[in-house]
Image: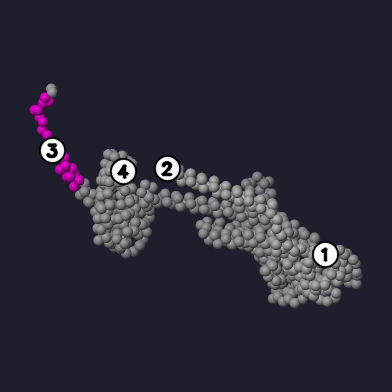
Amino acid sequence: MKKKRAGSDRSCRSAVMYFVMAFSFCLFLWIFITGKAPDVRFDSEQSAAVTGEWKIEYQGQEVQSELPGPFSPQKEELIRYSTELGDYGIKGNSVMLRAVHQYVRIYLEGELIEEFGYNQETPFGNAPYNAWVIARLPENWQGKTLSIETVKYYNGLSGQLGRVYIGTKNALVFQVIHECMPTLIFNSAIILAALLLLIYSFSFQKKYITYQLRCLCIFSLVTCMWLILESGGYQILWGKAPLVSNALFLLFYLIPPACIQFILTYESFSEDRWMNLLFWLANLNFIVVSILQITGISDFIESLIGAHVILLLVMAELLFRFIMRILRRDPVKDIQLMAACLSFALFACLDIVRFYVGGTDISSAYFSQIGVVIFFSVLIYYAVRQLVLERDEGMKRELLEHMAYTDMLTELPNRNAFEKQMALLRGESGPGTMVVVADLNELKRINDQWGHQKGDAALIFVAAALKSSLEDCSGLYRIGGDEFCILSDRISGKEAKAFEERLEEKLGEAENELGFPVSVAVGWAEEDECGIDLAFRRADFTMYEKKQQMKRKRKQEELRSEPPECDCGGIKNETE
């Protein structure tokens, strides 16, 4: 009755909660559709692109053209862009551009107002790296000439001047935030998930799953941190562009070895000779590139081809293995890994092609970001599924262990648990363990006279009486049909006697609870130098003697309680 009422109350509460949520949703919808209010967002200000033709000067040549212009300057060659600022219909007096491995100077009417890349120092290399450059103009900037000088640091690897924006600094900063926000949010979420999984992996029992998950977490952290830095969003919080750019390249060169190491954790690739060779080549490439950067022989960006080739070879090996297994009609193992890695490698290859064919762009990892979304969506789903399976297997193991070592009737540890503890005690040196053996008397008679359900009830009652008579019942076992045993190093002979008295008192309540009396024979012995097995035999022998005494005593009481036989011989029924 109580269960039905609880279920009814639960259903009622659920219905009320669903109604309140639906009503709240309707209210929100009504407010958003019909409500009117001024826009007070922090990013309500607008910026504008400085469009139109610019005067572009390069090596004595001068043309009028829209950005980026027809020229392709080489390393250390200066190119100058000039335009007359007009009225763009916006507030603000700040200009912003993206510097891509360039030295930049910004002038207004010939007066220098901002420069980038000239005053920097790093442990190795002084290349100007990627950054958004914002310069504040005087209040009366309309109608004046804005000039921007750029000097490339590399041949073919430095960007040209793309778009130039004008507006308030707040509007320009929020423009950067809007461009970087999807990358920041998605990759930050993956970084957080990877850190949590990395911490949680220490609770795993299967070593190969733990190692695999940690390799995935490391690959996730390296790749997502690289994408965040590549997006330029780091300037929202930190402005040390050279330091960030060095970290960006280090992370990029770590991607191939981290990716391959993760792939090698799968059984279908663990013995792949080519993939193992690529792993060592990727690590060697990282070391060589770092040495070249430190010694000044070659900058990070000039050595990218090694990492690009390794990524292409990884994709080729994955694709080759996948196709060969299909052609041979072999079962495709680790299909999730194949799909995820091929997606990431394919989109990364598109960015590699853009890098060499289309030139350096503001976002040189556009396709890689899409590949990362697919890669981690597949693998995180697979990893979470593995976590669920691991948890379910753990619960099954715990249940099986509980069933193997627990008596289902009394919920006490069973004979298996008793033998396990005895084996541990045999390995310990020195006396001290008290062995108490208790046996329920006449269980067969109870089963025959009152039924097996009453017999089970008697066993449960005795188990509860034993537990309540002990201060510490952790060493109480049911070792047979009607036999119990206590192994404890906290009970002395005096305490064992007191325990027996408490038990007799508890058993006195049996007739009220069960409808018939029960009795238990108890014997105990303390372990000495002869070992725990001899102590158990002595306790069992003592219990058996008491059991026989109680049996004889009960028979005598039954004989005394029987009425004397009546000799009616010779007396006939009067009705006969």
Marks 1 and 2, how far apart in space?
A: 77 Å
- N-terminal of the pair, mark 4 or mark 3, is 4
Q: Is residue 119 above or below residue 215?
A: below
- N-terminal of the pair, mark 2 or mark 4, is 2
Residue 564 is tagged as 3
Tag nearer the camera, 4 or 1: 1
Question: Residue at (66%, 53%) from the top-left corner?
Answer: 31
Q: What is the span of residues highlighted in magenta in the rendered image?
A: 553-574
Q: Which residue is mark 1?
A: 88
Q: Amino acid at mark 3?
A: Pro
Marks 2 and 4, how far apart in space?
A: 28 Å
The residue lying furthest to the left in this view is 570
User: Mark 2 Cα within 10 Å, few/some/many (few <14, many 20+)?
Assistant: few
Marks 1 and 3, how far apart in space?
A: 126 Å
Q: Locate residue 147: give its quadrant.
A: bottom right
Q: Is 517 placed left or right of 323 in the picture?
A: left
Question: Residue at (72%, 76%) from the top-left corner?
Answer: 121
Q: Is residue 441 above or below residue 250?
A: above
Q: Quadrant of the N terminus?
A: top left
Q: Is residue 472 above or below residue 113?
A: above
Q: Which residue is mark 2?
A: 1
Tag nearer the camera, 1 or 3: 1
Give 86 or 317, whichever is nearer the viewer: 86
Give 565 or 418, whichever is nearer the viewer: 565
Q: Which residue is mark 4?
A: 455
Q: Mark 4–mark 1 contact, CB under 8 Å?
A: no
User: Mark 1 Cα within 10 Å, few/some/many (few <14, many 20+)?
Assistant: some
Q: Is residue 527 visible?
A: no
- N-terminal of the pair, mark 4 or mark 1, is 1
**SS label for mark 3:** loop
Q: Amino acid at mark 2?
A: Met
User: Mark 3 Cα within 10 Å, few/some/many (few <14, many 20+)?
Assistant: few
